[in-house]
Amino acid sequence: MNAGDSNRRHFLLAAAGAGLAGAGGCRPLPPPVPPVQWVGDTAGRGHRLRTHSSGAKDGAPGGVLGGAPAVRRAQIVVVGAGVAGLAAARALQRRGLDDLAVLDLDDQPGGNSRGHHMAGLDCPLGAHYLPVPGPHALVVSEWLHEIGLLHTSHGRSMPDERHLCHSPQERLFIDGAWHDGLLPPAEPGGTTLAQYRRWAREVARAQTLGFAIPTTRARWSAALAELDGQTFATWLDAHELRDERLRWYLDYTCRDEYGADASTVSAWAGLHYFASRQGFHAPGDDAPGRDAVFTWPEGNAWLIRRLAQPLADRLHAGRLAHAVRAEREGVQVDAWDIASGRPERWLARAVVMAVPLFVAARLLADPPPALVAAASRMRYAPWLVANLALREPLLDRGLGAPASWDNVRYGSPSLGYVDAGHQRLSPAVGPTVITAYWPLATTERGALLADSASDWGRRVMADLQVAHPDLPEKVQHIDLTRHGHAMGIPVPGTRGSAALAALSELRGPVQFAHADLAGYSVFEEAFEQGERTARTLAGR
């Protein structure tokens, strides 16, 4: 978020409470913020590792001694129960390595894919959809077949349509009205449409370079390395793609996928978003249709439950791992059981570090040079996720396209909101929950931690009211979730980093499995990394 975005946000805050002048010329006070609270927030737990790392070396984090640790054993310990850690555990079990333990800081597994329940309804705390896998995402496709989301018909994988995003899928609020889809409208014969078509040609050209999801399925080349070495904005300028509406749309896609705009992410990342999928098609040109996505009211927590269920009592939530040491006969993991307030010491033959690289570098007593180098390069985007319980749906006011699953306002500092109730099959109109997503600049991480829930609630309300003036009278309460290090940002040089490649090749008792190893964070990449690590350990 740049300074202009910040100024716009503060303007909206003021505008939200402004009304027509009364008889005395006074403006009313801003409408009161409904009850608002932080939920699913474990920043304090994680920061104990950061601020008290010296004390963590001797048992309890923060130097608080809890007596001798309880010694526990497992053949393999997985640190982190996000998508990568759960996928690694699943793949290990499938290979007969069932003597394992999965430790996680949070009280529920899933990392950025956790779910929530408010006002009697499910809603997401983070990631909220999964695209139907493309031809390269073989590992994810296999699992989706296993759980019934995909089935084979006439030799082709077909999705279970009950779990696909219902129509209408997306809309954009621009020029005072809602428009179908997220691409800003363009006048026939105008400059914007010409720029859309120019961009479509560049994406088609990029598709010949071998982009793929997961990225491990694509051969790295000098052409891709050149794209990785510059920002996306620099590349767009060089290719004379400067139209305001096109650039807003491309900034939006980067913020949605990577948590940062085109001036921050690499040109490889900006092109990868389109070239690894169905490409880009200008309005009026032949197109295969929108990418089909799976989604649920609770978001990707639906998938997490199915990954975690087979683990049963092998999953140990509420564990703050704070020291990992490779010993002569295996690996030692020191953790803190938050619920009981007691230390644990896990002894294992091998450990899977399924946590962000900067966390892995802090946990390991003797981190390998490749990890130190890779962690120092990574940058992470902070996110705010706001769930608003509404007593009834928001009004459309007859302004164009009808209410959709994904609803975005042109020029907003947020990414808009999704309607958790959109996926319900019941035709009844009643209470619902909308989930607003705010990717923040790295410089705003401190404000995300320090500012009150009420402060952030006001910002969210002010942003949404621009398109929905009826919002204040319908909001019952707001639950906020902060992700201080939500996802790795693929800044220039990240994807082609030699350190990342070296980490993937390590063959010791400590293995790494996280989407960071792909240079950016999506479900398919994390799942692939977990599977790859399990193959490595099973091969030993």
Image (cartoon, rainbow, N blue to C red):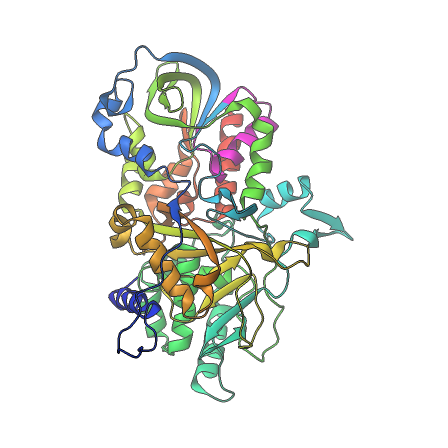
Above or below, 363 relative to 297: above
Residue at left offset 34%, top offset 59%? 459
Residue 488 spot, x, y in % from top left: 37, 48
User: In the depicted view, which residue is nearer to us: 261 or 508?
Assistant: 261
Residue 62 in the image: state x and y as whole percent. Answer: 24, 25
User: Residue at left 28%, top 35%?
Assistant: 47
- The image shows residue 413, relative to residue 525, as above or below, that is below
Q: Write down the quadrant of residue 93 in the picture.
A: top right
Q: Residue at x 44, y 80 (%)?
A: 175
Place residue 353 in its image quadrant: top left
| Region rendered in magenta | 79-100
Which residue is nearer to you in this view: 299 or 17? 17
Is 442 on the left-hand or right-hand side of 304?
Answer: left
Q: Is residue 87 magenta?
A: yes
Q: Is residue 445 left or right of residue 285?
A: left
Coordinates of residue 139 in the picture (x, y in percent): 59, 42
Q: Residue at x 52, y 41 (%)?
A: 527
> Which quadrant does the N terminus fall into?
bottom left
Q: Is residue 126 magenta?
A: no
Number of numbered discs overlaid on the protein picture: 0
Q: Is residue 223 visible?
A: no
Seen in the picture, residue 450 relative to 312 is either above or below; the reply is below
Q: What residue occupies the far top of the structure in this picture?
A: 68
Quadrant of the image occupied by residue 484: top left
Q: Relative to the observer, which residue lies in front, 37 or 514? A: 37
Q: Position of residue 477 (x, y in %)?
A: 44, 51
Instruction: Point out the residue furthest to the front here.
Output: 23
Question: Who is closer to the viewer here, 404 or 393?
Answer: 393
Residue 375 in sight: yes
Furthest-bottom residue in view? 189
